[in-house]
């Protein structure tokens, strides 16, 4: 019985040993395969990264791709090397053969090819790529700035708004050749003033008084900058505000209505002194009695359409005479013979009175001698 167990155990041991040996052999074979695979990879790398050489009759050396048998470069006897871009070649292939970025550009690779290959802007800038080329293939403005492109180089390819958002100040843009007119609308007015621009500068650039007032620029600054009354009025300033800034009524009268000027504190006497005619005040709704009180003359008032009959109670006969009215017109205007002293003071004679239709009896009855 013991012998049977011995045989079984021995068989199991031998089986285990055989399996172990098989595993060891398999592992060794795997290592050998890996080594062979690495050798093949190395050989492939050698074939793809090394070139075979041919020499022309003139001494120029030509280098060809081992696998593709394509001409990759020529080294001339003077030491200059010319590279070639053969079909389906890649940037990395030529780089592996020693081509520089400049060489790659010279054989026709575009900025878009370099972007796909993962090149950064700085490398491409260093070999002569310009902003517009790099922008057109998708490189960002921030990437351009990081690469060292100057604002002067960026200005033709980006808007003021884009450059401002990238962090450039108004003064930097002016130094780069932008005009204040180009900056208009992209920077806050106060920001421009804080950078040293005057209100006069902003006016020259086309900013309206209304815009500047809305942005907080005071009336005195606008006046100093040379904005005229129409511009200030359009900006929303009242006649009262302009009056406080020492604008005269004479300056304001052609820009604000009579009623507005009255509401802003100017009296009717101020308006008359500023040259407003009786007609203008009448048209603005000023009453007949107010015009009389203001001291307008007979001629002023009759020129507005008021009649002698309306005016006779407020003026003497001689004032009508001096205004150019004839005695006949004055008589027809409603003056009576009981006002004869006024006629006498006006220098009219008895004969003149008779000539306009007064009878001798009426004249004598009125006390005219």
Image: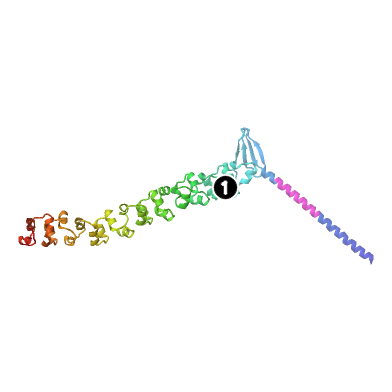
Q: How is the image coloured?
A: rainbow
- Label count reads 1
Q: Main secondary structure of the magenta part?
A: helix
Residue nearest the viewer, comparing 43 with 104: 104
- The residue drawn where x is 67% and y is 40% is 52
Of all residues, the one furthest to the left in this rendering is 361
Image x and y of residue 285, in percent: 26, 61
Crowding around mark 1 (Cα neighbors within 10 Å: few <14, some 14 to 19, many 20+) is few
Residue nearest the viewer, comparing 238 with 368: 368
Residue wearing tag 1: 146
- The residue drawn where x is 58% and y is 49% is 115
- Identify the element where label 1 is drawn: helix
**Where on the picture, by quarter, is residue 49?**
top right
Image x and y of residue 108, in percent: 56, 43
- The residue drawn where x is 39% and y is 49% is 224
Residue 40 lies in magenta, yes or no?
yes
**In screen coordinates, is 260 left or right of 53?**
left
**In screen coordinates, is 201 left or right of 314?**
right
Image x and y of residue 126, in percent: 58, 42
**Where on the picture, by quarter, is residue 66?**
top right
Query: Magenta span covers which residues?
Result: 25-43
- Quadrant (top left/top right/bottom left/bottom right) for the N terminus: bottom right
- Quadrant (top left/top right/bottom left/bottom right) for the C terminus: bottom left
**In screen coordinates, is 81 left or right of 338?**
right
Q: Is residue 139 visible?
A: no
- The residue drawn where x is 77% and y is 50% is 32
Image x and y of residue 69, in percent: 64, 42
């Amino acid at each position: 019985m013991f012998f049977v167990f011995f045989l079984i155990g021995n068989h199991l041991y031998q089986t285990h040993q055989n399996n172990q040996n098989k595993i060891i052999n398999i592992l060794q074979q795997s290592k050998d395969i890996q080594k062979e695979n690495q050798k093949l990879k190395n050989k492939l790398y050698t074939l793809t990264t090394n070139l075979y050489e041919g020499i022309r009759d003139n001494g120029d050396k030509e280098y060809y791709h081992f696998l593709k048998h394509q001409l990759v470069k020529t080294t001339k006897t003077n030491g200059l090397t010319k590279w070639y871009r053969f079909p389906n070649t890649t940037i990395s292939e030529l780089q592996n053969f020693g081509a520089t970025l400049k060489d790659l550009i010279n054989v026709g690779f575009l900025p878009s090819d370099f972007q796909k290959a993962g090149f950064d802007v700085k490398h491409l800038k260093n070999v002569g790529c310009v902003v517009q080329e790099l922008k057109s293939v998708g490189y960002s403005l921030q990437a351009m700035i990081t690469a060292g492109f100057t604002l002067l180089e960026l200005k033709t390819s980006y808007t003021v708004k884009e450059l401002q958002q990238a962090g450039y100040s108004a003064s930097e843009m002016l130094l780069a050749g932008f005009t204040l007119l180009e900056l208009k609308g992209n920077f806050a007015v106060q920001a421009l003033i804080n950078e040293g621009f005057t209100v006069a500068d902003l006016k020259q650039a086309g900013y309206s008084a209304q815009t500047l007032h809305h942005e907080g620029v005071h009336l005195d600054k606008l006046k100093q900058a040379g904005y005229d009354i129409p511009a200030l009025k359009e900006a929303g300033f009242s006649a009262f505000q302009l009056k406080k800034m020492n604008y005269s009524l004479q300056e304001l009268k052609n820009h604000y209505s009579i009623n507005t000027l009255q509401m802003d504190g100017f009296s009717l006497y101020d308006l008359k002194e500023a040259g407003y005619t009786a007609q203008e005040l009448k048209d603005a709704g000023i009453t007949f009695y107010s015009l009389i009180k203001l001291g307008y003359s007979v001629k002023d008032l009759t020129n507005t359409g008021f009649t002698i009959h309306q005016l006779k109670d407020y003026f003497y006969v001689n004032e009508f005479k001096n205004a150019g009215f004839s005695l006949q017109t004055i008589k027809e205007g409603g003056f009576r013979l009981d006002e004869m002293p006024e006629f006498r003071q006006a220098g009219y004679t008895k004969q003149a009175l008779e000539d306009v239709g007064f009878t001798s009896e009426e004249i004598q009855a009125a006390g005219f001698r």
